[in-house]
Image: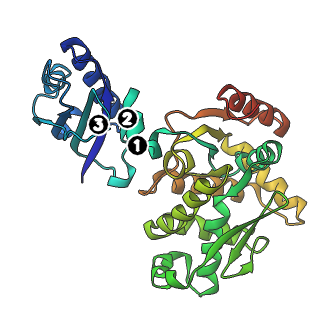
């Protein structure tokens, strides 16, 4: 698949500054998108008319981009536009889709894409099932006065929709034809999140192992992730949120001020699930639950669309041997260090 990655940076109009800034920008684009130099097809550069000390393409050659097509152009001179700016458009062969690439804007050029570069007042929490991320997210939201957004509940709601339609887990892809009939919304009241499916409160109905399996199945579907992802992004744009899920820091709110990845060993997570079921009066088999945890992890990490991964700028917290209170304290420390909450 071919994708185009954009970027920009500002520099002073000297040969040394232009080459240094261009190398810095290209290197970050390559690193952030896991690009191999052999996969770069072309790189187009523009510079504002106040920059003429050297061609920025020289920097590309110097860092090893020797087989791609390189071209340099003048940027249009628009009144009031950013000065001393180098812009890049890099075309690459990649396994990423266009909406999954990371565009890079640095130094003074961050003003060109505030939607990417301005950090949202949000905490993005990712991690596997049973790691404790939902517990942490709820505690953080209550402590900070933010809205808690349980994105996993939205996938469960779509799974419930499929079940109610009589669609088997093996055939969930057939649910696309019913997407127009689906309305999944989150409601927020007194710090609590309620999940609504076509107007009905299904908050309690979605908390079963069967629906969890459905959620794992529908989460692989591109049309479901796009539908629910857009809803999640809209909430993050409107409110101060603590949002947890599998691709929050990497896809839904990649510009969140704080990103956390909450993890725990498979054994610990299976044991937590076992105790959760026991508290509900449900007898569970540990070996079965353990295998379900392992399979869920495999599904989440290997799906082609927005898989579960650790965001590059996320802080990892292993909760295996930590109490909920200790995890909360650690998360709050990180949040305060990032200036999100005092």
Please state which of the two labelled residues, at mark 2 or mark 3, is closer to the viewer. Answer: 2
Q: Quadrant of residue 334?
A: top right
Task: Pinpoint residue 209: horizontal percent, then vertical percent.
Answer: 71, 67
Of 144 and 140, the residue lying toward us: 144
* Crowd class of label 2 (few under 14; some 14 to 19; many from 20; radius 10 Å): many
In the displayed structure, would residue 61 be above or below residue 149?
above
State the CA–CA distance, disc 2 to disc 3.
Answer: 17 Å
Q: Residue at x 18, y 14 (%)?
A: 15
Per the rendering, the mark at residue 113 is 1
Local SS, label 2: strand
Q: Which mark is residue 91?
A: none
Query: Which of these two is toward me, 260 or 104?
Result: 104
**Quadrant showing the N terminus:** bottom left
Q: Is disc 3 placed on a helix, strand or loop?
A: loop
- The quarter of the displayed image where residue 90 is located: top left
Query: Contact (CB < 8 A) between labels 2 and 3?
Result: no
User: Is 168 positioned to the left or the right of 144 in the image?
Assistant: left
Of the pair 25 and 125, the residue shown nearer to us: 25
Residue 148 picture location, percent across and down: 73, 54
């Amino acid at each position: 698949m071919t994708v185009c990655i954009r970027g920009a940076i500002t520099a002073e109009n000297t040969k040394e500054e232009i080459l240094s800034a261009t190398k810095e920008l290209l290197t970050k684009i390559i690193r952030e998108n896991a690009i191999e130099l052999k996969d770069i097809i072309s790189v187009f550069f523009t510079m504002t008319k106040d920059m003429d000390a050297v061609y920025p393409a020289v920097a590309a050659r110097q860092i090893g981009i020797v087989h791609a097509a390189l071209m340099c152009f003048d940027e249009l001179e628009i009144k009031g536009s950013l000065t001393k700016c180098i812009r890049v458009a890099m075309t690459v062969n990649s396994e990423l889709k266009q909406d999954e690439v990371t565009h890079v804007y640095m130094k003074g050029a961050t003003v060109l894409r505030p939607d990417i570069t301005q950090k949202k007042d949000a905490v993005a929490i990712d991690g596997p099932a049973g790691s404790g991320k939902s517990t942490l997210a709820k505690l953080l939201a209550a402590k900070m006065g933010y809205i808690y957004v349980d994105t996993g509940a939205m996938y469960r709601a779509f799974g419930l929709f499929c079940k109610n339609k009589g669609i088997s887990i093996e055939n969930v892809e057939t649910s696309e034809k019913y997407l127009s009939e689906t309305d999944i919304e989150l409601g927020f009241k007194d710090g609590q999140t309620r999940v609504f499916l076509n107007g009905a409160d299904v908050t309690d109905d979605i908390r079963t192992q069967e629906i969890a399996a459905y959620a794992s199945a529908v989460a692989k579907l591109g049309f479901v992730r796009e539908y629910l992802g857009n809803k999640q992004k809209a909430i993050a744009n409107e409110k101060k949120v603590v949002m947890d899920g599998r691709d929050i820091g990497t896809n839904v709110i990649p510009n969140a001020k704080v990103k956390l990845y909450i993890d725990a060993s498979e054994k610990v997570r299976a044991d937590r699930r076992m105790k959760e079921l026991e508290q509900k009066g449900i007898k569970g088999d540990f070996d079965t639950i353990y295998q379900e945890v392992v399979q869920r992890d495999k599904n989440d990490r290997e799906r082609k669309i927005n898989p579960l991964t650790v965001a590059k700028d996320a802080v990892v917290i292993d909760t295996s041997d930590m109490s909920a209170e200790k995890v909360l304290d650690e998360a709050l420390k990180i949040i305060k260090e990032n200036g999100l909450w005092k």
